[in-house]
Image (cartoon, grey):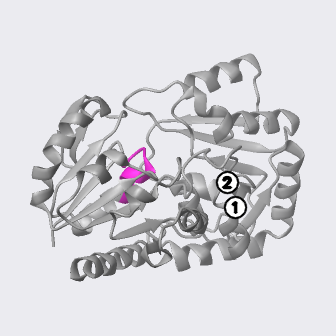
Amino acid sequence: MRVSYWTTACLDPRIEAVSKELEDLRTRFGAGRTVALSEHLTRSICWSRAGMGLHPRFQNALRALMPLLELFGDLNHVYAEVAPSTFLNGLRSRPTILTIASEKGDPREDLVRRCSAIVVQTRGMARRLVEAGVDAARIRLIYPGIDLGRFAPRSGAEAAPSRRVLFATFPRAQEEIRDRGVAFLLEVAAEHPDIEFDLVSRPWRSGGTALAAVKDELARRPRANVVLHEGVHADMSGFYHRNAFTVIPYMSAAGGKECPRSLLESLACGVPALVSRCAPFAEFVEEEGCGVVFEPSPSGFRAALEQGLADYPALSARAAASARRHFDLEQTLLAYSALYAEVLAA
């Protein structure tokens, strides 16, 4: 079985969750080609072990080449946003699976009808597809997988270490700061100096404007309770184990990745989540009881933090248990293996 992967990821698994999800799939199944169409590549055209990358300005050339490139695989797996028109319009001769790894945008039934199956990472996205006219029988819920051998509760994890909160889904562009919730966290930090924040920013090779903007804000209004960490961290478990909670403070449903990898890994470490009511992942947190959902206001955040601390041992245990149930990498790969076989046999 040769699976060809088509993606809008930047092919850098060190800094981008979608790239890491794709790398895990390619490691297990990647006998075919990988083609990325992304504005976040280091060069307009690049080749690496991860695949071939093109800047979107070359999408017309890619459309012309896709019928030929498609022949090198038995199955297409598009790993992208809700309606990746370049890929879904261009892939015609092989069965195609779409994984919606980013829920930004509106579903287009005319595009997804060309897919043999559509994989979603939240139940909310499944409902949106059904409302758009997609047959529910073609939709699969498969969560991203993480290595549970690397990320696990530390000894004594049931005791909350402090009022320290981790935010590790830092945006790339300054325009994303509000919706991602960074400005909100800085507001909370100013109003509640007893709550400490670790903010982790990874460097985008294509550049970015969010980090400089946050630095400027911290220079204008210093906050002793905010620590900004820059760089690529090969092992994030140290951050997870030193924090009581991981926060997803989105101010809108399109604030960022719906299943952030840092959140899944921290749950596996027994670190509960504090999640804004606006974030799509809030539904999962409420159903699993692995954290606290808060109204997006400083007082709402404070109330959620205090509630989480009061019930910390139970939340921590449920966080680790939910990760074992839903985010085991081997479980994810087995689900995709079964789906690939089903689509090829149809």
Secondary element under disc 1, as helix, strand or loop, is helix
Residue 296 in the image, given as x and y percentages of width and height: 80, 47
Quarter the C terminus occupies:
bottom left
Residue 18 covered by magenta stretch: yes
Is there CB contact under 8 Å for labels 2 and 1? yes
Reply above or below: 121 against 338.
above
Locate residue 339 relative to residue 310 in the image: left or right. Answer: left
In x, y percent, where is residue 39? 36, 33
In the picture, residue 309 is in which quadrant?
bottom right
Q: Judge whether residue 141 can be spotted in this image.
A: no
Image coordinates for residue 60, horizontal then vertical, percent: 23, 35
Q: CA distance from mark 2 to mark 1?
A: 6 Å
Mark 2 highlights which residue? Answer: 279
At label 1, counting other C-alpha atoms closer than 10 Å, the crowd grade (few under 14, some 14-19, many 20 or more) is many
Left or right: 6 as drawn, with respect to 181: left
What span is in magenta?
A: 13-21
Quadrant of residue 180 within the rendered picture = top right
Between residue 267 and residue 103, name the one nearer to us.
Answer: 103
Identified at 18% across, 35% down, the residue is 61
Residue at 21% x, 42% y: name it. Answer: 63
Secondary structure, mark 2, is loop
For disc 1, the marked residue is: 282
Amino acid type at circle 2 is Ala
Residue 220, numbered circle: none
Crowding near the residue tagged with mark 2, few <14, some 14–19, many ≥20 C-alpha atoms within 10 Å: many
Give coordinates of residue 298: x percent, y percent: 85, 43
Q: Decide if residue 242 is on the left or right side of residue 62.
A: right
